[in-house]
Amino acid sequence: PSPSPSPTPDPDLLAYRRAHEAHFRDTDVTAALAAWDAYLAAHPRGRFSAEARYNRAIALTRLGRHAEAREALAPFARGDVEHGYRQRESAALVDALETP
């Protein structure tokens, strides 16, 4: 019998992994932000889009882009994302970013 063909890689998962590795393994915040943006452009409603949007906001925070980070975190802080996903953490971050 011939070997079964390799399964086709899941493009959603592959794009997410690239961003995740830049963010958490490589700790390259600039590359991570670019990778989160690329993931969200290719998979705006992807399986990992909520986590990608949250991690993108964290990258913006780390880069000192606080106004953009607050805007990205606002839907999370209001509880508008997938059953209150990361609501408490986001609200705390929004408060911290607004404090001079």
Image (cartoon, grey):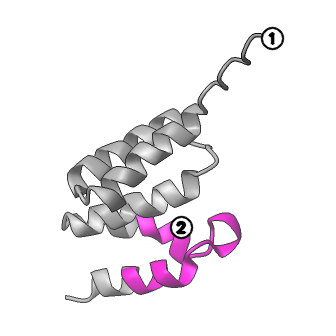
Locate residue 34, reporting x and y percent: 30, 44
**Seen in the image, is 80 located left or right of residue 39?**
right
From the viewer's side, name the closer residue of 57 and 8. Answer: 8
Segment tinted magenta in the rendering = 72-93
Dominant secondary structure (helix, strand or loop) of the stretch shown in magenta: helix
Locate residue 41, reporting x and y percent: 46, 36
**Seen in the image, is 94 located left or right of residue 2?**
left
Q: Which residue is mark 1?
A: 1
| Residue closest to the far front | 1
Locate residue 38, reporting x and y percent: 40, 38
- Is residue 31 something that shows in the picture? yes
- Which amino acid, by three-letter code, is at mark 1? Pro
Locate residue 63, reporting x and y percent: 20, 63
**Mark 1 and mark 2: span between their CA atoms?**
53 Å
- Which amino acid, by three-letter code, is at mark 2? Pro
- Is residue 40 something that shows in the picture? no
Residue 74 highlighted magenta (yes or no) = yes
Dot label at residue 75: 2
